[in-house]
Image: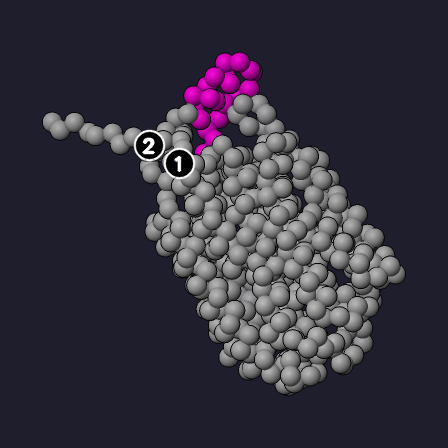
Amino acid sequence: MKEERLIPSPPASVRRWRGYVVIVGGILVHLSLGTVYTFGNMTPYMTSYMRQKNVSADLTYADSLWILAASAIGQGTSVFIGGLIQRKLGTRITTLIGGWLSSAGVLLTYFTIKTSFGLTVLTYGGLFGFGVGIAYASPMGCGMKWLPDTKGLVNGLIVAGFGGGAFVFDQVQTAYLNPSNLVPGKEVGHDKYFDQNSILDRVPSMFLVLGGCYAAMQLIGVILLKEAPKELTEQINRDMEETQLISSTRTSVDVRDTDLSPREVLKTKAFYMLWLLYLLNGQGIQFISALYKTYGQTFIKDDHFLAIVGSLAAVCNGGGRIVWGVLADKVCFKVASMMSCGIFCVCLLTFSLTERVGSGLFLVYVCVMFLSFSGNFSLLPTATAKCFGQKYYVINYGFVFTASIVTSPINVVLTSTLQASLGWYGLFFMVAGFSFTSFLISMLFNEKRPDGKDV
C-alpha cells in the first residue's frame, strides 16, 4: 500500500508575506467596490441631470436615495450567495464574478440614466450592489486564513480599501464633471440643483470612465489573491484546538466548537445582536454617506471644497477601519462598538453647529462621522469570525449582512416622508436615536470566546 505523502505547510515567514500580498489584492478589489460611497458626491450631478433632461423632471434628492437603497439591498442579498459560490468555485472566481458584475452595473448606467430613473436604480443601484455583495467577503476570509492571529487587522486593512474608494473617485468625478467649480444654479424648496449643460452633458460618459477603471482594478486584485493551502488551514485548526484544550484545563469555561454552521448560528443570541447593530447603524451610515454634500450645499458655495470633504472623509472611513480593526484585536468588541456608536451619535446631535460656524467645522464633523461609522465594517466581521469561527465565515457574515436589505428601505422611506416636516435638524435627531439604541445593544453584548475572554 502506497504511503500517503504529507505536504508541509509553508514556513511562517512565507505565510506572512503571502498573506500581505493577499491583503494588497483585497484592498485593490475593495477600492472599486467601496465607490458606493461616492454616491453622496454623485447624486447632485445625477439628480440634476435627470431633472434637467426630463428623464424624471420632479426627482428630488430624497427620491434618489432609492439608488443607494437598491445597492444596499443587492449587497445584503448577495453576500450570502457569494459565500456559497466561494465554497464551490474558490476566492478568485467568486471575487471576479462579483467585481465585474458591479462594474457592468456602472457601465450600463451610461444608457439607463438617459432613459429612466427606475432603470438607473436597477443598474447603478441593484446590479452594482449585487456584484459588490458577491465579491465583498471572500478577500477578507482569504486573508484571515493566511494571518489567523490578526483577524481584526486583516479585516481592517482590506475594508480600508472599501472605505477609501471615494478618496480617489470623488476627485475624479468632480474634476471630470465640474472642472470650473460651478455652483448649483437652480433652487427648489430647500434643495439646490445644477442646471449648467457644461456639467450635465458629461454625466453619462462619466459612468464609462468609472466602470472601466473598476474592472481593471478588480482584475489586478484578483490575480494577487490566493487560497491558503489546505495543509496550512488544517494545521491552524489543530493549533486552535490545542490552545482551547489548554485553556479549558486552566479555567472553568466550557469549550465549544468554534466553527458554527449557518444553521447553528441562527440559534445564537449573538447573531441577532450583531444583526440589529448592522440594521440600526445602517440608518446613520446611509443617511450621512448619501446626503452630507446635499446638506453642505445649503450653506457652502464651493463644489470643489465639498469634493475635498468627501475625499478626506473617505480617508477617515478607510483609515478608521484599520484603527477599529486593531482595536478589535486589542480590546473586546463591546467596548469598541460602544465607542463607535457613541461618537457618531454625539456628532449627529450637534451637526447643525457647522451651519453656524462654517465650512471648516463642517469638514471636521463629516470626517469624524465617517471615522466613527467605519468601525462597523471592521468590528462586525471580526466579531462574526470570533463568535462563530472561520470555516463558514463568508456565509455567516452574509447572514449578518442581510440587515442591509431592511435598513436601506427604512432609511429612504423615513427620509423622504419626514424631511419636509422635520427639516435637516429633525432628521439629525431621528438618526441619532438609532445610533443611541446601537450603543445600548453594544453595552449588553457579553459573548465569550472558548478561552473565556470577551469577543
Residue with the most extreme top position: 250
Residue 150, position in %: x, y? 52, 35
Residue 59, position in %: x, y? 68, 77
Q: Nearer the viewer, mark 1 or mark 2?
A: 1
Say if residue 412 shows up in the picture: no
Q: Residue at x 76, y 81 (%)?
A: 186
Secondary structure of the residue carrying tag 1 is: helix
Report, in whole angstroms, how far the alpha carbon at label 1 lies from the one at label 2: 9 Å
Q: Residue at x 51, y 64 (%)?
A: 128
Which span is picked out in magenta? 240-262
What amino acid does circle 1 point to? Answer: Arg
Residue 39 badge: none
The reply, left or right, for residue 400 in relation to residue 183 is left
Q: Are discs 1 and 2 less than 8 Å apart at CB?
A: yes
Say if residue 31 shows up in the picture: yes
Residue 9 badge: 2
Picture quarter containing residue 203? Answer: bottom right
Residue 15 badge: 1
As displayed, is residue 303 above or below residue 218?
Answer: below
Q: Residue at x 72, y 70 (%)?
A: 303
As displayed, is residue 256 above or below residue 168?
Answer: above
Residue 192, position in %: x, y? 76, 75
Which of 105 and 270 lies nearest the eye of the viewer?
Answer: 105
Q: How is the image coloured?
A: one colour
The reply, left or right, for residue 49 in relation to residue 28 is right
